[in-house]
Image (tube, rainbow, N blue to C red):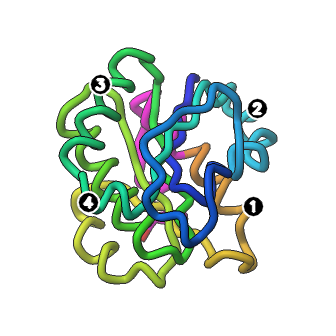
Amino acid sequence: MKVIMIYDQIQSGAGIKDDHMIPLGAKKEPVGPAIMMEQYLKTVDGRVMACLYCGDGYYEANPEEVSRKLCAMINKLKPDVVMCGPAFNYLGYGKMAANIAYDINQTTDIPAFAAMSKENEETINEFKDKIHIIETPKKGGIGLNESLDGMCKLAKALVDHEDLNPITSKYCF
């Protein structure tokens, strides 16, 4: 199972919290949470083929352009699934992750979902009935390993067209 991760500037390592205007970029190797996720990906025969990213402020200023380009990159790279997050408690990233997952699901044949913490309440309420959103702890919180495992299980179930209810009821908002 080939996975693409969508990150903000922080999770990708391309910038820090205040570097909101990092333009769209890509890394061909796992970075950030994808490295911590590798043990769970192995259990579902998955691997991260690329990490795509941009600053949350850059996305906010150019949502249509970023979404169009990301969807084009995803269509070109042909992953089996796209994970947008984990956004933790970063509100700008949470909003970006949910919007991008929604756009990917609407404009490509590749399933996508988001992951974020409950602090993104406004975004969760707006999108929980439109996309799957895995619950994560806030940055530095307890329970990240379980969330990463849930992300991998949901990805596998989406790719294999399995019943999602056991996974979504345990891991999603």
The answer to whether the residue labelled 4 contacts the one labelled 2, judged by CB atoms less than 8 Å apart, is no
Reading the image, the residue beneath label 1 is 145
The answer to whether the residue labelled 3 contacts the one labelled 1, judged by CB atoms less than 8 Å apart, is no
In front of the other: 47 or 44: 47
Residue type at mark 3: give it. Answer: Ala
**If you read the primary sequence from the N terminus, does the residue marked by circle 4 or circle 2 appear first?**
2
From the top left corner, tell me how far across and down residue 106 is, in percent. 18, 39
In front of the other: 78 or 173: 78
Give the magenta-colored segment's residue range: 154-172
Quadrant containing the N terminus in the rendered view: top right
24 up-or-down from 148: above or below: above
Quadrant containing the C terminus in the rendered view: bottom left
Q: Residues within 10 Å of mark 1 (few under 14, many from 20)?
A: some
Mark 4 and mark 2: Cα distance apart in space: 37 Å
**If you read the primary sequence from the N terminus, does the residue marked by circle 4 or circle 1 appear first?**
4
126 up-or-down from 28: above or below: below
> Is label 3 in a helix, a strand or a loop?
helix
Comparing labels 3 and 1, the label whose residue is closer to the camera: 3
- Of helix, strand and loop, which mostly describes the magenta segment? helix
